[in-house]
Image (cartoon, rainbow, N blue to C red):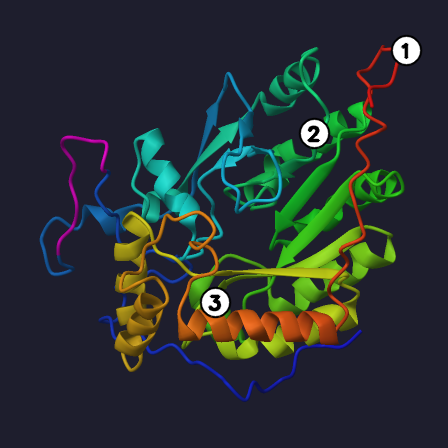
Amino acid sequence: MATPPKRNPHKVTPQKKEPSGQYKSGRGAQINTANRFLKNSTEKMQVEAIDDWQDADVATEYQEQRVKSMVNKVDSPDLPMAYSMNPYAGCEHGCIYCYARNVHEYWGYSAGLDFERKIIVKTNAPEVLRKFLMQPRYEPTPIMLSGNTDCYQPAEKKYRLTRKLLEVCESFHQPVGIITKNSRILMDQDILERMAKKGLVSVLVTLTSLNEDLRRVMEPRTTTAAQRLKVIESLSQSGVHTGVMMGPVIPGLNDSEMHSIMKEAAAAGAKFSAYTFIRLNGAVKLLFHDWLQKNFPDRAGKVWHLIESSHGGTVSDSRWGVRMRGEGQIADLIHQQFKKYSTHFGLQDDRWQFNTGLFQRPGSQIRLF
């Protein structure tokens, strides 16, 4: 397979301007934003303040919870599947742009550092999923794993909830679409290969940059680009329908890498591709702006204005059909490039479909079609 070039002609190098010891290496967010659902909250306004409590605890904390529901109905027409399920809330990967950060406020936490270090573990997720699939009114349709946080984040090494969810799906012949940026998915290559033979699984591997300097600060606790390409190669060789997700594309930071990413992914065996354009809703707007100023002070204003120009003068956009693609000259150019490169590199596998005809509840004598 092809490997990422050692030197990126569009190299973007972070320039941290924080005082020595203040920048939290290994974390995307550098602050905790206020929770919009809490009447009272505390936050650190400046690093010189005496209330230095926020820096004291940056270790990851797993909080085990039993949940009543597991499968969520997806109402957005921008997403391809009708349902999604997430075994974890919060994500240690720490991707600074992640829209799921805002969801962490529903759990009573901040979308900032709390999102990365206070991970909710839904310990009874497999049994709740099984109960959902056993409902007589449920009609088989692909379920997305995960719709918010990465189902193969570091917590999976300890809890193996994603593996258990896949085992439930396999027993029902329930189709699953997976999106991840972690090479930990290869721990489940055996079950994915079995499901792939029946048309029950498709995997999207997120790859946002081949530049390791950028990845380390933008997605601090994720696997390298080289490892993600190896995931695409390994899964593809196992017969798993595998594609590449470039999400999000950020003008002025990683937009110039689209050609290289799609070329490398295709060489590794990817069969299809997708992308999203960055949008910064809710607290993510404040977190990304703070991160941008601290890591790229030389281009922060330019990047910010490019994002604004692609969302009607704002960095946030909630309009269905537009919010994940953007609009305007920059967004249109990126979309045209995506279409051109996906055709050129053969990443338009539109004929593949999930097999929903095999769905069967364990113990049932009649398959549901």
Earlier in the chain: of badge 3 and badge 1, it is 3
Element type where label 1 sits in the image: loop
Residue situated in front as seen by the camera: 26 or 328: 328
How far apart marks 2 and 3 lie (CA) works out to 30 Å
- 24 part of magenta stretch: no
Q: Which residue is mark 1?
A: 365
In the rendered view, tell whether residue 336 sits above or below residue 316: below
Q: Which residue is mark 3?
A: 216
Residue 331: mark: none
- 40 part of magenta stretch: yes
How far apart marks 3 and 1 lie (CA) works out to 52 Å
Q: Which residue is mark 2?
A: 164
How would you rate the neighbour count of disc 1 (Cα within 10 Å): few for under 14, some for 14-19, many for 20 or more? few
Apparent side of residue 363 relative to residue 74 in the rendered image (left or right): right
- Residue 210 visible (yes or no): no
- Which amino acid, mark 1? Gln
Element type where label 2 sits in the image: helix
Residue situated in front as seen by the camera: 25 or 35: 35
In the rendered view, tell whether residue 125 sits above or below residue 191: above
Residue 268: % across, % down? 77, 68
